[in-house]
Image (cartoon, helix red, strand yellow):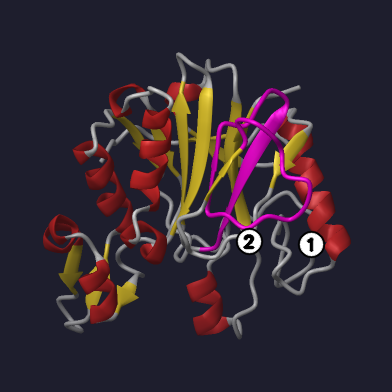
Amino acid sequence: MLSRPCRRRSHAMIPCEQNPSWSDAPFAHGFFGRLGGVSPSPYDSLNIGRSTQDHEANVQKNRSLIAAQLGINNIIHPGQVHGTEILDLSDHLPSDHVVADAVYNPPKSVGLAIQTADCMPVLFAHKAEGVLGGAHAGWRGFARGILESMLQRFQKDGLQSEDISVAIGPAIGPGAFEVGEEVVDAMPETCRELCAFRHFQTGRWHVDLKQAATMMLRQSGVRDIWVSGSCTYTDQAHHFSHRFATHHLNGQTGRQVAVIGWPG
C-alpha cells in the first residue's frame, strides 16, 4: 500500500482529499467528505445521496457546489446497487436515471460520481490517453470483481493495467470493519490469507478492504496506486459512515462522493 500522504484541500471552499500524483493532470478530481454543504443534521452537511431522507433541494445544492468547485459542467451520478454493472460513456450520455456501480470514460466537460458511506470509492486514470473511470467497491462489489471488470474495460480499448493510475479514497478501516464468515469466504483466496484477520480480543473476523483492493490491483499489473489513510467510521468529523450511523444514530446518515472528470 502506497504511503504517500493525501492532500486535503483546506484552502478551498469545500475540503477534499486528492491524489498528489494527479496534481498536474488536465482532469479534475476530489474525494469529498461531509463538510462544506447545506444539509442539516444528521446529514450535515455535504450529503449528495438521494436515498436518504434529506431534502432534494439540499442534495441538489450540495452536488452543484461540488461541480462548481471542480469546474465540471455535468457530473453523472448513477444509482448504485453493490453490483458490477459499468456505465460506458464512450458513445453517449444517459438521458435519465441509470443504475451502475462503475462509470467509464466520461467525455469533455463531463465527470462521474461515486457515492459512499463506508465502501471504497476507486478512481482510475489513463493519463496518456485521457481515459477516466470510477467504481463503487464495497465488500460485495469487490468480491464480485468490480475492479477487475474496470481494468478489463480499459484493456478492451487497448489500455494496459501498467499504464493506469488508481486512487482509493476514504473507506471503513480494518479496525472498524468487523464481518461474518460469509464475507471472509467471499474474498479471493489470497485476500483471505493476507487481508482478513481475527481480532485479538474478540476473536471476530475483520477485513482490510483497502489492502485487499491494493493487492488485487497490483496482481493485475497496476503500478501507480494511491490510498487514502482516512477511515470513514472513526473520522466522523470529516466523513459519513453507514456502520457508525447504524451503531449510534438509528441508521441515519448522508453519502459522500468521489468525483473525477473534465472541466469545462
Which residue in the structure is indicated by mark 2?
Answer: 255
Q: Which residue in the rendered view is the most extreme toward the right?
A: 57
- Can residue 33 be seen here? The reply is no
Check residue 230 in the rendering and tell me which mark sits there, or answer none. none
Rendering coords of residue 145 (x, y %): 34, 54
Relative to the observer, which residue lies in front, 126 or 153? Answer: 153
Task: Name the residue at 17% across, 69% down.
Answer: 197
Asked which quadrant contains residue 185, the reply is: bottom left
Which residue in the structure is indicated by mark 1?
Answer: 39
Quarter of the N terminus within the rendering? top left
- Can residue 123 be seen here? The reply is yes
Quarter of the C terminus within the rendering? top right
Look at the picture and state if 4 lies above or below 253. Answer: above
Relative to the observer, which residue lies in front, 4 or 90? Answer: 90
Q: Is residue 108 magenta?
A: yes
6 to the left or right of 200: right
Magenta highlight range: 89-117
178 to the left or right of 16: left
